[in-house]
Image (cartoon, rainbow, N blue to C red):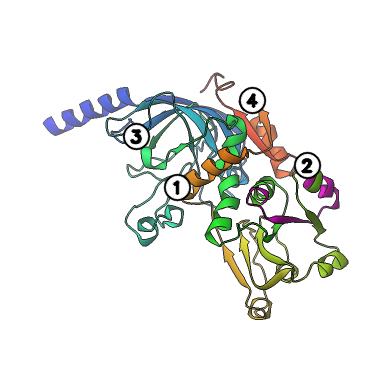
Amino acid sequence: VLNERHGRIKERAMAQESKPALGWAARDASGLLSPYSFSRRVQKEDDVTIRVLFCGICHTDLHVAKNEWGNAMYPIVPGHEIVGVVTGVGRGVRGFKAGDRVGVGSFVGSCRACESCVKGYENNCPALLLTCNGVDCDGATTQGGFADVLVVNQDYVLRVPEGLPPAGAAPLLCAGVTGYSPMVQYGLNAPGMLLGVVGLGGLGHMAVKFGKAFGMTVTVISSSPRKRAEAVERLGADNFLVRHDAEEMKAAAGTMDGIIDTVSAGHQLLPLLELLKPMGQMVLVGVPTEPMVLPASAIVTGGKRLAGSGVGSVRDCQAMLDFAGEHGIAADVEVVKMEYVNTAMERLERNDVRYRFVIDVAGSIGCAAV
């Protein structure tokens, strides 16, 4: 009886200490979001409490909200491209204080013991704790940044340079590091290198910006001829190839040191690999749902290499943010209010955005929640 009474008292105390939150959540596979009241976990000694300012909308949010990967745990508050301001820290937190501008990306925890974690590649941890639709150590489902407040372990909080616009910085936490990390990890960041970027969406436009900042010659490869002017004149790409133009692709064969492939729809890899020099490297960061066919001769001949990369480690994310701050790199965004989120998700599904939607969370989350 005493144990039961103690348990009830502890539960009430934790409920009082937990942080009430207002967000927008999907309740079923329709993916439609609506206002949602919930509680963030009790701030622990090593936690940082963050008031969310802006949160980007990623294709992953769309997949998760609609249960397209079959692992949705409803209700789901999406969002993993988060910029906010610290409002509180636990007693054990070092390096962050109230008022600091910070970011949170795709994950908020890892096992810290596996080989990947020990080597500083937490993003490859088999027990990676996702920012939304993950299962925390207490069994609770993690909820993302389409909400007014967030509580995160200090080791997964990032410092956002003051010089970056907060709305434009939000997509860096996913779209930015997804392009930056493989460039650094695979040595595709040396000045003078010839880099190909396949696709010119949220990921692709960031890869172009980072490639140019590294001093590389950047060629955008797209299936859409109408993006030529945008790529070259607005984003600063040096060249542009139409993926289905056989003559253009043939003329560029064997010219590239590396390729970052950002396309998430099914497409042929062989024509892209033919653009690489001998010993060239192609990295896939888009995730098509369909299997992709690749003749072994495409990589055996010329010793070409094909790899994959998913977001980036905490170390990569912070290095990317620092680099972006030094070079004034931010995403091109369309800022929307929270009540526009369902329309934004529909437009994202049609690729009707240049290049990332970002929700003004702090400016619009006051909607009544239920």
Tag 3 and tag 4, C-beta contact below 8 Å = no
Residue 352 seen by the camera:
yes
Which residue has dot 1 on it? 314
Residue 2's x, y, as percent?
12, 30
368, 4: nearer the viewer: 368
Tag 1 and tag 4, C-beta contact below 8 Å = no
Indicate which disc, 2 or 1, sits on the residue closer to the N terminus.
Answer: 2
Q: Of helix, strand and loop, which one carries label 2?
A: helix
* Residue type highlighted by circle 4: Lys
* Residue type highlighted by circle 1: Val
Specify the quadrant of the image occupied by residue 12: top left
Q: Of helix, strand and loop, which one carries label 3?
A: strand
Mark sitting on residue 337: 4
Residue 356 painted magenta: no
Mark sitting on residue 234: 2
Q: Nearer the viewer, mark 2 or mark 4?
A: 2
Q: Which region is colored magenta?
A: 212-231
The Cα–Cα distance between marks 2 and 1, rounded to whole angstroms, is: 30 Å
10 Å neighbourhood of mark 3: few (<14), some, or many (≥20)?
many
Left or right, 124 with respect to 233, comes to left
Residue 40 seen by the camera:
no
Which residue has dot 3 on it? 47
